[in-house]
């Protein structure tokens, strides 16, 4: 066709919409389920997916996005590992006329025109629901309730927001005290290692709040090795509700999980088609989620897909 001035129709050789996706990494069960959801949904939607795993490094994500711009893909989507530092590369995509969709995690850019929409969870709410459950659970406790916190990746939206929501909720009861808080980078190995340090430094730990299941699962090993009974000596709250987390909850090792759904693939493909067609999409699309107690985990577990 003679419309050479737009020049950016990246449609694949077979006319398929081409989506360049930059994934955070493979740090957790949540992330694995998220990647599978995106790959499967692309196949079902007839979208050609270019996929890059950034191994939890922002510089790798920026490089992947620049590659997608150079390849003139139709749409770019990514899950930003941290919140800050995206304006330059997002501006490059905008100047190239390639629409960008944020999935799962947000950026803190003041210029909202740098992306079309943000699809993902309300992380502040997940933290708040976790904190509210704890306030109720420890209502009758006498004396200080010592909490240790395993944070997600430093500077990431879910770590910042879950910390905030949890902190605001537990402020309702002054006996609930966070005595230590450190990043375990959303991994099992990180959770185990930091929990070992916490246990060495603090003889009385009543509660663990882990920003995801995987860090909580890693911490279980450290707690057991220290001769304590998880779920009894230490109350454990996590976020995500992936299968291994739900199993630990049903087994009585965890006490509460706030769900965070990784199944964003189908909605993402739908949005990619819409923004490519120049249709308006809502600036924010929130994932629907619930929470689980031990009893609820036992019921839900047999049908849990991921
Ligand atoms: O909770 C954690 C993962 O960004 C919501 O990243 C996601 C988080 C999820 O590593 O398990």
Image (cartoon, rainbow, N blue to C red):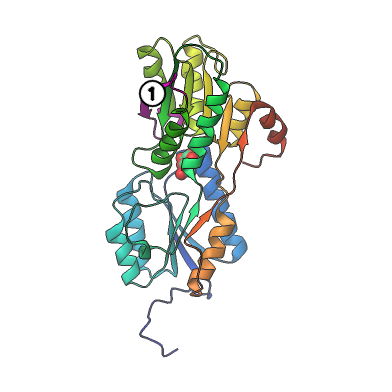
Q: Which residue is painted at 51% across and 14% down in the image?
A: 224
Instruction: List x then y, in percent, for residue 207.
Output: 48, 20
Residue 230 in view (yes/no):
yes
Q: Which residue is painted at 56% across and 29% down in the image?
A: 133
The reply to whether the magenta stretch includes residue 127 is: no
Instruction: List x then y, in percent, for residue 234.
Output: 51, 16
For the record, the magenta segment spans 173-190
Secondary structure of the residue carrying tag 1 is helix
Instruction: List x then y, in percent, for residue 125.
Output: 50, 41
Q: Is 187 drawn above or below residue 32 in the view shown?
A: above
The reply to whether the magenta stretch includes residue 186 is: yes
Q: Is 299 drawn above or below residue 236 in the view shown?
A: below
Q: Nearer the viewer, residue 147 or 6?
A: 147
Q: Nearer the viewer, residue 237 or 67?
A: 237
Q: Read off the residue under disc 1.
A: 194
Residue 78 position by quadrant? bottom left
Q: Is 170 drawn above or below residue 202 in the view shown?
A: below
């Amino acid at each position: 066709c003679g419309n050479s001035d737009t020049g950016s129709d990246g449609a694949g050789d077979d006319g398929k919409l081409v989506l360049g996706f930059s994934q955070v990494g493979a740090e957790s069960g949540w992330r694995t389920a998220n990647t599978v959801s995106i790959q499967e949904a692309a196949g079902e939607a007839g979208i050609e997916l270019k996929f890059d795993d950034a191994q939890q490094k922002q510089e790798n994500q920026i490089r992947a996005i620049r590659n997608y711009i150079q390849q003139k893909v139709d749409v770019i989507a990514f899950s930003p590992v941290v919140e800050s530092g995206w304006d330059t590369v997002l501006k490059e995509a905008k100047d190239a006329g390639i629409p960008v969709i944020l999935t799962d995690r947000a950026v803190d850019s003041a210029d909202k025109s740098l992306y079309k929409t943000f699809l993902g969870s309300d992380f502040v709410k997940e933290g708040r629901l976790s904190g509210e459950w704890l306030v109720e659970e420890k209502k009758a406790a006498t004396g200080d309730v010592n909490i240790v916190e395993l944070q997600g990746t430093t500077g990431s939206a879910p770590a910042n927001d879950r910390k905030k929501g949890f902190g605001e909720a537990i402020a309702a009861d002054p006996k609930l005290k966070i005595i230590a808080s450190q990043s375990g980078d959303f991994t099992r190995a990180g959770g185990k290692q930091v929990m070992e340090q916490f246990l060495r430094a603090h003889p009385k730990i009543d509660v663990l709040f882990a920003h995801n299941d995987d860090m909580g699962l890693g911490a279980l090993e450290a707690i057991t090795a220290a001769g304590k009974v998880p779920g009894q000596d230490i109350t454990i709250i996590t976020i995500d509700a992936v299968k291994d987390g739900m199993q630990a909850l049903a087994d009585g090792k965890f006490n509460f999980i706030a769900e965070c759904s990784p199944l964003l693939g189908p909605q993402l493909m739908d949005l990619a088609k819409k923004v490519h067609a120049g249709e308006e999409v809502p600036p924010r699309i929130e994932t629907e989620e619930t929470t689980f107690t031990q009893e609820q985990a036992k019921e839900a577990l047999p049908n849990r897909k991921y």
